Amino acid sequence: MIPISHYDPMSRKDAILTRSQVEGMIADGRTIFIVDGRVIKADAWLRYHPGGDKAIMHMVGRDATDEVTAYEFLFDQKNKALTELRPSNRLHSLEARQHMLKFQIGRIEGRWRNFLPPIQGGQFRRRSQDAKRPQNGRYEETSSSSSSSLSGSPLFDAIEESSDFGNRGRTPALHTSSSISSLSSIESPVVEYKSKLSLLDARTQGEIDLDLVKYPALDPTTQDDIVRKYRVLHGKLQAEGLFQCNYTAYFIETCRYIFLFGTFLLLLHHGWYAMSGLFLGMCWHQLVFTVHDAGHMGITHSFNIDTVVGIMIADFIGGLSLGWWKRNHNVHHIVTNSPEHDPDIEHMPFFAVSHRFFDSLRSTYYDRIMTYDAFAKWVIRYQHYLYYPILLFGRFNLYRLSWEYLILGQGPKQGPAWWHRWLELAGQVFFWYWFGYQVVYRSIPTAASRWAFVMISHMVTAILHAQITLSHFAMSTADLGVNESFPQKMLRTTMDVDCPEWLDFFHGGLQFQAIHHLFPRMPRHNLRRTQKLVQEFCKDVEIPYALYGFVDGNKEVIGRLADVGRQAAILAECQKTIAEKGDLGHH
Ligand code: HEM
């Protein structure tokens, strides 16, 4: 007799879902992504997620395996060889990964072809009636999709596969500026200027074309090979212990922090206010690197311990919000250098790293239009001259963003990160008490020396802002679409800075941004050792590895800003002339 358990239908979580079924659910507003062949529906979890809702929203319809998982090799002691490759708990803790399984609603078969997520403009077809509950481990197809009677069937999926009929959104194609196209109704006197304007559109396509030539092809075989080798590399790094924290290195960092902070206090005590501000600024500059590590859970890899370390430094000592930074930074790591989605390159009206910002793009991170208004039109023309002066005020802007985040409660209010906001608010009170009241108000006697102290301490940290922008501002902002693999995208949009080893402390790990983007949880003191392995990987998969000296990197950034500034000037000139000559034409 067959045991009764053998009659049980396959668990609902193991039901095989087709691509069109997943599409239908996303069209109905569900938050669905794929991890390790499992279909995860995260609707109920979105507002509790410690990584922020936007990080998940950029993964909807996509295979998020490489973004949410890290890999490790098992080491066969007997044969002294690397054996099985399996997911590790480095990126999401074991508990988080187990928690994720609670949201599993099915599985997929074979290779997943990514959709463009709704937040990025992807369009999804609704199914007129959704599939029934699974029977025998497979959802029954009962009705047609609203757009095709074959939808949901294997045949339909096959047609989609060959025709790329799936979800439509903005594909890597010529991007036509609304402001430019609206001018096309104006006639002949302005033909010359219109041809100049069309050059701007050609540049967008030009950047995409250049990337398509410089980087490996986007076909599944090539990209799958890159992903496979990237996972193997990840496993090798794990096996070599490169994800283990180097606590001795942190001890040395701590000595440096104590020296800088102690010198600041000493000079303050002796009335050398300007010099004292300089040392406080240098101390903040250095401390931020440890906040960056902690924010990535790259020190102890414990979510709670690293978060507390980060909040203590960022909020209590620096007056900035770790929560704001994490929310911002997690998105930056997922949609690096995308003008519409990456907050790290969205600095309108002060900087535009692509002429696409002239279109008054909508930021999905800030949920607002980044208006290319009269002020922006003027500033962007001179942005290469204004770059360093504006960076001097960067830290003041960080206060604004931190308070906005904490006061408006933009972080998760429930779930594992519910307490962060309260600890951060306590940190803000503490900071303004010791810095604002005790140091600036009580210890410094005159308004002039207070002003000098505050300005110097804050402006010194401009170096950090230059270091942050350096890795991305000069790199590609082109969107190569959903078929590009995670490692290729990271290496295409990020560059490293070459510096002697003794200067590593000064750059705080930010000089290895490309490596950091590939392995965000890797402790910064191991990045240099990893560089060689990444270079070998790049050579193997034929992805160019961008490496510049600090000065050359700065020149690249200034060159890019000047280039976009020139385009802004051309656009302004054309618009003016078209308006004048167009008017004349009418009269
Ligand atoms: C239902 C699905 C998910 C669950 C249950 C989940 C759960 C968690 C949990 C519990 C943490 C805290 C750290 C830990 O304990 O490991 C976390 C952090 C994080 N998650 Fe997720 N997650 C999910 C999906 C995603 C997705 C799709 C992404 C996008 C790539 C993502 C990105 C992150 C990031 C970047 C962090 C770090 C947060 C920080 O330290 O600020 N997660 N997640």
Image: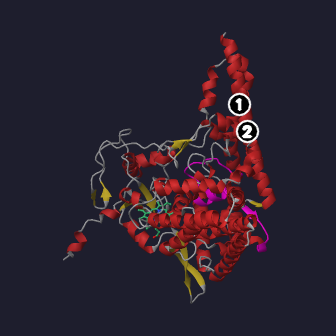
564 to the left or right of 109: right
Q: Which residue is mark 2?
A: 381
What residue range appears in magenta? 474-502
Q: Is residue 483 magenta?
A: yes
> Which is nearer the N-term, disc 1 or disc 2?
2
Rendered residue at 69%/64% (across/down): 538
Location of the C terminus by quadrant is top right
Residue 351 vs 79, above or below: the answer is above
The residue closer to the viewer here, 186 or 429, is 429
The residue closer to the viewer here, 29 or 76, is 29
Rendered residue at 55%/54% (across/down): 401
Secondary element type, mark 1: helix
The residue closer to the viewer here, 336 or 492, is 336
Q: State whether residue 295 appears in this view.
A: no
Q: Residue placed farthest to the bottom in the image?
A: 78
Q: Which residue is mark 1?
A: 572
Location of the N terminus by quadrant is bottom left
The kind of residue tagged 1 is Ala
Q: Is residue 518 magenta?
A: no
Asked if the residue at tag 2 contacts the one at tag 1, i.e. Cβ–Cβ closer than 8 Å, the answer is yes
Mark 1 beta carbon near ligand 1 (under 8 Å): no
When asked about the image quadrant of residue 351, the answer is top right
Say few, some or many: other residues with alpha carbon within 10 Å of mark 2 (under 14 / 14 to 19 / 20 or more).
many
When asked about the image quadrant of residue 502, the answer is bottom right
